[in-house]
Image (tube, rainbow, N blue to C red):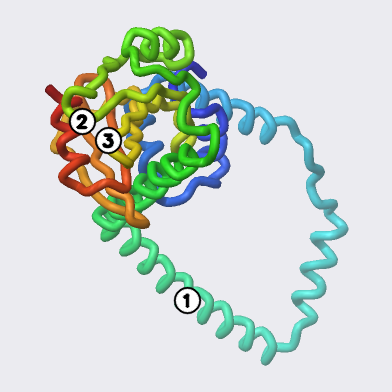
Amino acid sequence: MSCDLEYSVAHSYFDGELSVAQVFEFKRHLGRCPDCIDELAALTAVRDSLKDAHLYEPAPASLRRKIRADLHAIAPTTRRSLLFAWRGLAVAAALLLVVLILWRVIPGVRKEEDYQAEFAAGIVDAHLRSLLPGQITNVNSNDPQTVGTWFEGKVKFVFPVRNFSDNGFALQGGRVDIVQGRTVAALVYRSRDQLFNVFVWRTRELNGSPRTGSRQGYQWIDWRKSTLEFCAVSAAASSDLERLHRLLTE
């Protein structure tokens, strides 16, 4: 695979191991990524070939005859009890089907909310990891050209690197990080005593209005521009985060 997602994400989706929010995000990604479509097709082909490999043996005829004989030996009253039991199971199955249909039809908003919550958790967790000693930058420089050159070959996209020290946001450097199984670039800025992470990754989503939120006392703002998605996060006030957002989008 040559897309930005980790190799294991497609396999986890294929095996049904992703959360609801992750499935929602991967399906959106799948609609725009031929690499992942090819990977899923290959996984399906392997599974089908295993099904056709005759790796199991059919039950012998003697076993089928024994089961039929045991069933005929059951008393009529027992048969009636079993019939009522099966009817009860059928009713329960029908109710479960109704619940599942409602769960699939109604939750469009809930899925988006789940995705939003999980997205925020991933972003904030990555920000918190970066605050550990020695984790904030892989390249420590306030020179945009030095930082931009360092990212070449480490991520599969090109993005602008700027220093806004004259506006109160001094470039500290950058690093490569992982957010929700996706390889991202992270630019680090400092304003007074606060650090700001600006995560950048490639996207095929259309540009839209910025999204904002908070989690565990950290504010974040996410937006898309051309083929890139950005998300800035910090413990600073929302007004400071918005100032950085305006500078990055000018």
User: Residue 89 or 135: which is nearer the viewer?
Assistant: 135
User: Which residue occupies 36% across, 29% down?
Assistant: 188
- Could you tell me which secondary element the residue under label 2 belongs to? loop
Identity, as a three-letter code, of the amino acid under mark 3: Ser
- Using the image, determine if residue 24 lies above or below residue 215: above
User: Which residue occupies 34% across, 26% down?
Assistant: 200
- Using the image, determine if residue 188 lies above or below residue 56: above
Label pair 1/2, CB-CB below 8 angstroms? no
| Residue 244, x across and y down, in percent | 20, 33
| Residue 48, x across and y down, in percent | 61, 31
| Residue 169, x across and y down, in percent | 24, 29
- Using the image, determine if residue 112 lies above or below residue 205: below
The residue to which callout 2 is attached is: 168
CA gap between label 3 and label 1 equals: 60 Å
Label pair 3/2, CB-CB below 8 angstroms? yes
User: Residue 126 or 146: which is nearer the viewer?
Assistant: 146
Q: Earlier in the sequence, mark 3 or mark 1?
A: 1
The residue to which callout 3 is attached is: 191
The residue to which callout 1 is attached is: 92
CA gap between label 1 and label 2 equals: 63 Å
Nearer mark to the viewer, of 3 and 1? 3
User: Which residue occupies 25% across, 50% down?
Assistant: 213
Q: Earlier in the sequence, mark 3 or mark 2?
A: 2
